[in-house]
Every structure is written in structure tokens, then in C-alpha cells.
Image: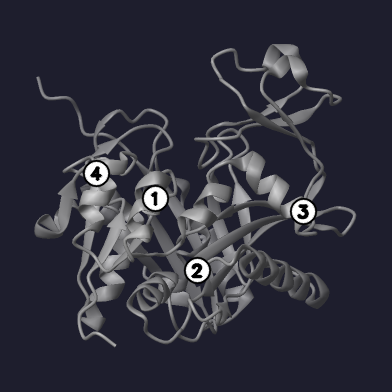
Amino acid sequence: MRTKVKIGILGGGQLGRMMQEAALPLNIQLQFLDPSPQAPCGIFEKQCIVGNWNDANSVVSFGAECDVIGLEFEDVSIRGLEELQSKGKKCIPSPQVLGIIQDKSKQKAFLRDAGIPTLPFQIVDAATEIQMDFPYILKKAKGGYDGYGVKKVNSLGDIPTDWAGPFVVEPLCEIEKEIAVLVARNERGETAVWEPVEMVFNAETHMVERLVSPGNLNSENRQRALDIALDCANKLNATGILAVEMFLSHRGECLVNEMAPRPHNSGHWTIEGAVTSQFEQYVRILSGLPLGRTDSTGYSASLNILGDISADGEADEATLRQRVVEIPFAHLHLYGKKWVKPHRKMGHVTIAAKTAKELHAYVSKIPIEALRILSLPSKP
């Protein structure tokens, strides 16, 4: 094994920043490609190269200096990764897996063909082709993330006129819980899995507001979720980290909603709440190191810090930081984003506890304003 593996990451956002934080104790340095010099990984000035992750030539040029290429954002150039792969560079995940994940219509077809439970669906190029009773869920096949590109449609008037197809259309599911399972899988096919988490979404933005680990699931549903997530990773032949988001329906079905081939918001709790965090695990896989244990160290919750509804400008981190550090049981993670807008993810808070009751008591004591960042007053 090489003593020094050059690792390149496509994307320099908050996930990349947390990857580098996890890599530091291992004395591993990552390189990042991001179009913005003000990206969160810009703090690692000598490691962050300004370039377009969606441009094949930029990706190839960046990857030429690396042994392994990973990512923290899946909307990257597949053509660039395919060229790097043809030149003997390791891509984790592979461009073949990314080709399925990037397009929700291909994702859904994969799940169906692999016999993995998911909602029935229709793929259309235009809204006029939809043959499904109201209400239904309309999703952009490409480009949607964090609740963007997803809309509940109750009538023809709800269909966005500025969206371009193709679309994935699904019936409305009566959901009891939304859960997620993270799977780590290396090139040898070895796997490790974290406890399922229960996610709570904002009804307006469809973004995750908080999650709890382990989720409040009975033993049957817990095991079913773990088995389905492992099935997804193995049948995809995925390497790296795979996040599998699922619906637990009122009828007791466990249905895969979407997958993400990278560290994921649903795994932020693992930094304080697991023996090995999702970020360290990904660095281990990229470096060829053995997988770490994924045991939980207790009960955890992760709460997203978002831009206030009125925010628009330079982030007032100082005020929020003061609020949160006064909460003795809260672990604050700010992502270093200079500009704040409504609902923009700016950081998260993790709560760790010994019991579920203690965790609930802690979470209930955190005021909502402690999780919202305002913008600084405009200068005259």
C-alpha cells in the first residue's frame, strides 16, 4: 500500500469540509475542486482549486494529479470521471453508479428491476403525459436536491410552468415515518452500516429539519431497513458511502425513496454519536484503510441551522454562535458560508445523550431561534 495516496474531492462545500476535519487526525490531506473560492473548503486555501466540477475537462485536469477521486456532491461530470477511470484512476463512487443516481428516472428503474421495494411511478417528458390521479408528487428527474425540484400537486394549477422534463411522478404515500440508513462499502465489497435514523422534514420546504438516531422503530422494521439499504449498496456495486432514504408507510411497508452516493445530511450525527463518523469512513475507503466500527455511542439528534426567512446578506454567525454555545449539551458545527438566504443550510447542532428520554429533554430545550441565522444589517 502506498504511504501517501493523493485524494481529490469534487466539491468544496460543507461535506468536504467535514471530510477534511475527519482526515486530519489520520494526517491525510484532501484536495478539493469547487467553482467558488468562498466555498466552505476555501478555508483550506492551498487545497481548494477553483474549477467547475460539471465540466469534463476541468474534472480530468483536476483528477490527473490524484490517485483517487471522491465527491461531496453528485451533480458532477460523469464524462470526466469516465475518462479518469479509463486512465486507471479510482473513482469512488464509480461513474457507472453516478449515472444511475444522478437521474431519478434511472434510480427508480434500477430499484424496480432489482426487486427493491419502492413506490409505483411514471416517467414522463411533459406534465401533459401524466396519467395519475391527484394528489401526486412531481419530481424533476435531474437537478433536484434538498427538497428543490419536488412538489406536491393537488390540481393542474400546481404544476410548475418553469420546470422542464423529464419528470418522475409518484402517488402520494401515507407516511408514518421517514427514515434513512447509511451504508459504507469498500472496493472489496465489505460493508458497515449505521443505525437507521428518523427524519423530520419541513412541510413547506421539504428539507430535513432534524433527525434522531436510533429511529423509533420496532425490531422488525429496523432490520428490514438495514437489509434494504445493504441490498441497494450491493446490487448497485456502490463504493464509498450510500445514503438510502425510505418511507415507512401506514401499511407497514418500507419503501426506498431516493439514494445519495456520498456522505449525507442524515449522517451528521455520526461525528459525535458513532465510533466512526461517516466522514472518517469515507476517508478510510478513499485511502484503502479498513472500515471502522459503526456502533452508536448512545442516542443522538442532529438539527439543521438554516437561514432565517428574512435573511439576505452576510451571515450574522456571531449572534448565533453565542446563543448555541450557551447550551451546554449542544455541539455546534458552522459551515463557514459567508452569505445567508432563507432556508439555506448554514450548519447543524448535534445533541448526544445516554438515553432516549434524556435526548428528548435536551432537544425540547433548544429554542427555534437558536437554529436560525439572520443577516447582518446593511452598511449605509
Q: Earlier in the sequence, mark 2 or mark 1?
A: 2
Q: Which residue is mark 1?
A: 370
Q: Residue at x 76, y 18 (%)?
A: 129
The answer, for residue 325, to whether it is visible in the render is no
Of residues 192 and 88, the one drawn nearer to the viewer in this rendering? 88
Of residues 77 and 227, the one drawn nearer to the viewer in this rendering? 77
- Residue type at mark 4 is Ser
- Residue type at mark 3 is Asp
Q: Which mark is residue 58?
A: 4
Question: Residues under labels 4 and 3: Cα distance?
Answer: 34 Å
Question: Residues under labels 1 and 4: Cα distance?
Answer: 40 Å
Q: Earlier in the sequence, mark 2 or mark 3?
A: 3
x, y percent for residue 70: 36, 61
Question: Residues under labels 2 and 1: Cα distance?
Answer: 37 Å
Question: Residues under labels 2 and 4: Cα distance?
Answer: 23 Å
The answer to whether 310 is drawn above or below residue 80 in the figure is: above
x, y percent for residue 339: 25, 36
Q: Which residue is mark 3?
A: 113
Mark 3 is surrounded, within 10 Å at the Cα level, by few (under 14), some (14 to 19) or many (20 or more) other residues, namely few
- Residue type at mark 2 is Thr
Q: Residue at x 45, y 64 (%)?
A: 268
Q: Nearer the viewer, mark 2 or mark 1?
A: 2
Q: Secondary structure at mark 1?
A: helix
